[in-house]
Amino acid sequence: MQATSRWLLCLSSELSFSLNEKATVLAGIDNEVVRSASQEFEMPSVILLSRYVRIPNARRVPVSRRGVLRRDAQRCGYCAGPANTIDHIMPKSRGGMDTWENLVACCLECNNSKGNRTPAEIGWNLKVLPKMPTGTVWSVRGSERPLPEWSEFLALQARAA
Ligand SMILES: [Zn+2]
């Protein structure tokens, strides 16, 4: 119930932007509408703010499996072969965290032979220095699973980055 009310709160603040003409709806989600007590709106999916609104923690890019694979261009951090898994450099079972610095793209073969050990323990060297990715395109919230309506705007972001 709490998640729902938080979502509604976000949504209503976006709508109040448009009502105050601080924001323009650039794209909506087809056939989805939201209703206030007196009016009906197309559900916004892209809004243009006429004034910059600071997003809390915007500089912190949320870590995800897909994000790590994308950051490392789907190359294994240990052998540079094609990767489709991710590895905790310090194994999770030994306190390794889900952070950009502790996660690296990894091929299945390296992942299996590394097992529950650190690279140092088996004499492996990382070919990359894992860190949080930077650049405009990484700061777009939800860009891992973009809505089709966003494609035009995300392409602009990628060119600007
Ligand atoms: Zn590998």
Image (cartoon, helix red, strand yellow):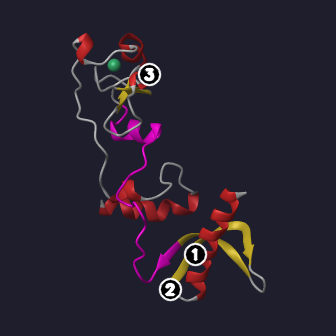
User: At x 44% / y 83%, what residue is drawn?
Assistant: 50
Mark positioned earlier in the residue sequence (1 or 2):
1
Q: On screen, 38 above or below 75? A: below
**Residue range (magenta):** 47-74
Q: Where the C terminus falls, by quadrant?
A: bottom left
Q: Are marks 1 and 2 in contact (CB under 8 Å)?
A: no
Secondary structure, magenta segment, majority class: loop
Q: Dot 2, crowdedness within 10 Å: few (<14), some or many (≥20)?
A: some
> From this viewpoint, is residue 111 visible?
yes
Mark positioned earlier in the residue sequence (3 or 1)? 1
Q: Name above or below for residue 110 compared with residue 83.
A: above
Residue identified by numbered label 2: 22
Q: Which mark is residue 125?
A: none
Residue 98: x %, y % from top left: 42, 36
What amino acid does circle 1 point to?
Glu
Residue 39, percent across and down? Answer: 75, 84
Left or right: residue 17 versus residue 110 is: right
Q: Which kind of residue does numbered mark 3 sit on?
A: Ser
Q: Does ligand 1 reach within 8 Å of label 1's beta carbon?
A: no
Left or right of 142 on screen, residue 128: left
User: Of the residues tagged 2 and 3, which is closer to the observer?
Assistant: 3
Question: Of the numbered discs in the image, which one, if any, rests on residue 93?
Answer: 3
Residue 45: x, y in percent?
Answer: 58, 67
Instruction: State the residue at coordinates (23%, 17%).
Output: 120
Does residue 62 appear to the left or right of 40 in the view shown?
left
Neighbours of disc 1 within 10 Å: few (<14), some (14-19), many (20+) = some
Q: Secondary structure at mark 2?
A: loop
Task: Specify the quarter for ligand 1.
Answer: top left
The residue carrying pointer 3 sits among few (fewer than 14), some (14 to 19) or many (20 or more) residues within 10 Å by Cα, namely few
CA separation, marks 1 and 2? 10 Å
Camera-nearest residue between 126 and 150:
126
